[in-house]
Image: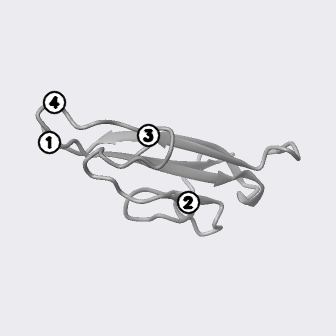
Amino acid sequence: MRIPPMASTIACGLGWDMLPGGKAIDLDTSCVCVSFNGEVLIDECVYFANLKSRSGAIRHTGDEREGDEDLGQGDDEIILVDLHRLPKKTCAMLFIATVATEG
């Protein structure tokens, strides 16, 4: 994966609000890295329970369980990626949003 010199850090933000009446919703954002041969690079994946990848290229700001935080521009959870630090075997990054609240 060749990265242009000016592009070094990207972010994926997930923002949401509580439901009317103040009911909290727990959403989670994750990043899954995949190699050129389709293998999931487990050490490079981040989510609410693993906030930093082994290489340090990918960082998660932490689990927000209610949607009432604002980390900037309305985001409640952010994943930051330093493209220059990604392992060379990384072909793709999948950003996933999951509803963790039952019902």
Q: Are marks 3 and 1 in contact (CB under 8 Å)?
A: no
Residue at which label 3 appears: 14
Q: Residues within 10 Å of mark 3 (few under 14, many from 20)?
A: some
Q: Quadrant of the C terminus?
A: top left
Amino acid at circle 3: Leu
Percent coordinates x, y for residue 10 in the rendering: 66, 45
| Secondary structure of residue under mark 1 | loop
Choose the circle earlier in sequence order: 1 or 2.
Answer: 2
| Secondary structure of residue under mark 4 | loop
Residue at which label 4 appears: 20
- Drawn side of residue 78 relative to residue 85, left or right: left
Please tell me which residue is depicted at 39% across the width and 39% down the height of the picture.
97
Amino acid at circle 1: Glu
- Nearer-the-camera pick, 13 or 89: 13
| Secondary structure of residue under mark 2 | strand
Number of labelled discs?
Answer: 4
Q: On screen, 8 above or below 44? A: above
Residue at which label 1 appears: 102
Q: CA distance from mark 3 to mark 1?
A: 19 Å
Q: CA distance from mark 4 to mark 1?
A: 17 Å
- Nearer-the-camera pick, 70 or 47: 70
Q: Is residue 37 visible?
A: no
Q: On screen, 96 above or below 65? A: above
Percent coordinates x, y for residue 62 in the rendering: 41, 60
Please tell me which residue is depicted at 57% across the width and 57% down the height of the picture.
41
Q: Quadrant of the N terminus?
A: top right
